[in-house]
Image (cartoon, helix red, strand yellow):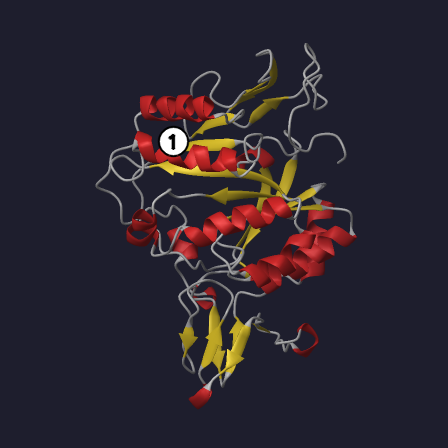
Amino acid sequence: MNETEYRSDAAGGHEAGYYEAMTQKAVACHLCPHECRIWEGKTGRCRSRRNRDGYLWSEAYGRVCACQVDPIEKKPLFHFYPGTDCFSLAAAGCNLSCLHCQNWAVSQAEPADVESRFLLPDDVAGWASRCACPVVAYTYTEPLTYLEYTRDCARACRERGLKNVLVTAGYVNEKPLDDLLPYIDAANVDLKSFSDDIYRSVSHAHLAPVLRTLQQMRAAGVWVEITNLLIPGVNDDEEMIRNMCVWLVEQGFADNPLHFSRFFPQYRMQDRPPTPVVTLQNARKVAQECGLKYVYLGNVDFPGSGDTVCPQCGALLVRRIGYQVDTEGFDGRCFRCGERISGRFTDL
């Protein structure tokens, strides 16, 4: 559908894009690789896009189920204005069905079944400005499932001089992402595994579209950081980790942060133990051996796991203890050797 032809209603609905009408009032959604065929009255796999009388509606549009001020490190984004607060928001829905989802109560629900408030895009930009947040983050669920709302909010925020960041699993088709990226400054992409079999069994998705999203974001000039949650016995194989890191280096991500995150039992994966810290430490060693310059460990509490150090001389540049961040004296270059540190640091 053409953007100028969109319909909306006061209840928090908005006609979706990226679909076509089919026979018997069915519609074909082309937002993501699932390519859902949706019958009248039903939703796609994301639970947030519904066929209403032959039109596809984004029922998440404007229905914000979470909004709060977070440190940018929570996303996690470590090389994007470290120490900055961001205005975080989410609507219900996700097009993956991860067995270990930590936000399942909202990501695996329909928008109408989740307590929410109605915020227009201009409202979001206004709230972010009033909260003195220079960055707005679309996070907690999957902002690409309600891409029309994410795009409109990002555009309104951009008009006020605010930055926009995505926290996403990256499972989206090329054309919708192309339409969104001009308004996006940074993203943390959750690369769940480097195995298509694991993607299918754990998240009910595929690996290749996520890799394409990473390449597409990089080509568009979006600052990208990557998170890999290591689940014991699922995706913590050293060879798989090495293959992932080699691919990232080959695709030009050697200067982009990689966050290995510790798993804790969640949702439908209660039978797995927390990730041993030594597994995370070994993964970081493998990543560094492959040529990745900035490798962080998340969901752990020990010295140095989140510090930014110069890859050239080893000087400590940004110290992190939890969400407490010390950036004193850091301007994007190493104070000792002058090495330029990749990221966005000084033009906020």
Q: Can residue 167 be seen in this snapshot?
A: no
Quadrant of the rendering where the N terminus is positioned: bottom right
Residue located at (50% from left, 58% from top):
172
Residue located at (50% from left, 69% from top):
30
Q: Is residue 184 above or below residue 91?
A: above
Q: Can residue 328 be seen in this snapshot?
A: yes
Q: Residue furthest bottom?
A: 24
Q: Within 10 Å of the Cα at label 1, are there few (<14), some (14-19), or many (20+) other Cα atoms?
A: some
Image spot of residue 102 (x, y percent): 38, 45
Question: Which amino acid is tagged 1?
Answer: Arg
Q: Is residue 106 above or below residue 301?
A: below
Image spot of residue 41 (x, y percent): 42, 80
Q: Which residue is mark 1?
A: 242
Image spot of residue 47 (x, y percent): 42, 66
Residue located at (72% from left, 52% from top):
157
Count the marks.
1
Q: Is residue 299 above or below residue 168?
A: above
- Describe the element under mark 1 as helix, strand or loop: helix
* Residue in front for this viewpoint, 323 or 138: 138
